[in-house]
Image: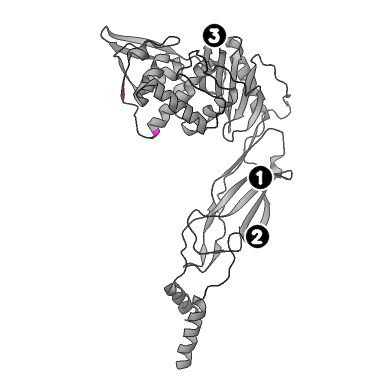
Amino acid sequence: MKKIILSLFLALQLACTPLLSLTAQSAPITYEAGISQNSAKKADDNKKTGDTLTLSAPSVLLMEAKSGTIIYEKDANKQMPPASITKIMTLLLIFDALDAGKISLEDTVTVSEHAASMGGSQVFLEPGETQNVDTMIKCIAVASANDACVAMAEHIAGSEEEFVARMNQRAKKLGMKNTTFVNCCGLDVDGHLTTAYDIALMSRELITKYPKIHDYSMIWMDTITHETKKGSKEFGLTNTNKLVRQYQYTTGLKTGSTGKAKFCVSATAKKDKTELIAVIMAAPDPKGRFQDAANLLNYGFAKCQFYSDPNTKKLKPLTVKNGSKDAVNVRYETPFQFVDTKGSDLNSIKKEISLPKTVTAPVKKGDVLGKATYSLDGKVIGEVNIVSEQNVKKAGFSDYFKKLFHAFF
């Protein structure tokens, strides 16, 4: 009996001694797996669109919304006045405030003298008039109302100046390097400049983070009610974006026109799984901007193939060294998506899983333990992290004793 106890004690001592082990940086086990295409096929495969487009505007950009892939551009980084496309950033800050719970759609907004004095496109709000936030958004998105923009800016930030400062801060965070906002509505003023590329960035942020904007930007006609000292009066709203009625895949977003900016539009559209943003700046006439946008969108839908791997397949647990548990479950961090504009065979995409044989405790939930790498024609097109699903703490004396007990009995 003494020999058995002595053997048990020696074995326990050995188990408690720290051991050299492999970590997540150790040589990975890899394998390749081809994945079938899970997307809508490229539109009109036999009718390939050439790379030359006839466009009237001097500056344009076409972007795929999910990935941010630029499909087509022409002088897209040239600084130009944006007119009412400015309101995309104004709407973005409004939705940021809604998302943060700082305002609600039912909040009452009181119109100031300054807001009511705005020229250009407006819904003729009067000083002291009140409307709720929902109505103000509708006025901005549908009728491009400058007075509603300024009223909302003051409601959120206290003054238009402070709101514009926040617009520029938000632009900086989005990487809009060639943008300076001077007002919140887009009226011509020196120094109020942006680019087609920067407009695409803020348009993408708005539609991907707050898709509810489409509920407003797709309204064709509506009315609001002015309640003033003069009484109650209805006012009609008509969407300034004619693509809402003229282009079947349209989802938004915002037009703009002034003497300096000429005619602009940031047009969003979705066909099957492909969502596009077409930015047109300084078109010579209103019809030209919409025709340019439609031409760009058609070009994009013909060029784009969408590839998706949902990454829902269960991965095998990894062995854990010196842990309170012997293994840890792992999963893909995100699905994988890829947009091709070159007519590639997406069935030839390869997926390579790279994971270590063993990891060492402690392991925290969300720790990156490996990755899935996707390649097409020998070139890497993207990666997805593989992460821990749970915490595994470093084993203590009691953990080793339990393991030893199970091993013996």
Q: Amino acid at mark 3?
A: Gly
Which of the two residues, 280 or 53, is positioned nearer the viewer here? 280
What SS does tag 1 mark? loop
Residue under numbered circle 2: 29
Residue 317 image label: none
Q: Residue at x 48, y 33 (%)?
A: 209
Q: Inspect the magenta stretch and tell me whether residue 128 lies in it.
A: no
Looking at the rendered structure, the kind of residue marked 1 is Ser
Q: Position of residue 22 (x, y in %)?
A: 59, 65
In the picture of the structure, the residue carrying the numbered disc 1 is: 36
User: Label 2 is placed on what type of residue?
Assistant: Ile
Q: Position of residue 105 (x, y in %)?
A: 35, 27
Q: Is residue 268 above or below residue 407?
A: above
Nearest to viewer (mark 1 / mark 3): 3
Crowding at mark 3 (Cα within 10 Å: few <14, some 14-19, many 20+): few
Q: Residue at x 50, y 82 (%)?
A: 11
Q: Which mark is residue 259?
A: 3
Range covered by the magenta-colored residues:
99-109
Q: Earlier in the sequence, mark 3 or mark 2?
A: 2
Q: Main secondary structure of the magenta part?
A: loop
Q: Is residue 407 left or right of residue 155?
A: right
Q: Is residue 106 left or right of residue 82?
A: left
Say few, some or many: other residues with alpha carbon within 10 Å of mark 1 (under 14 / 14 to 19 / 20 or more). some
Query: Disc 1 or 3, which lies upstream in sequence?
Result: 1
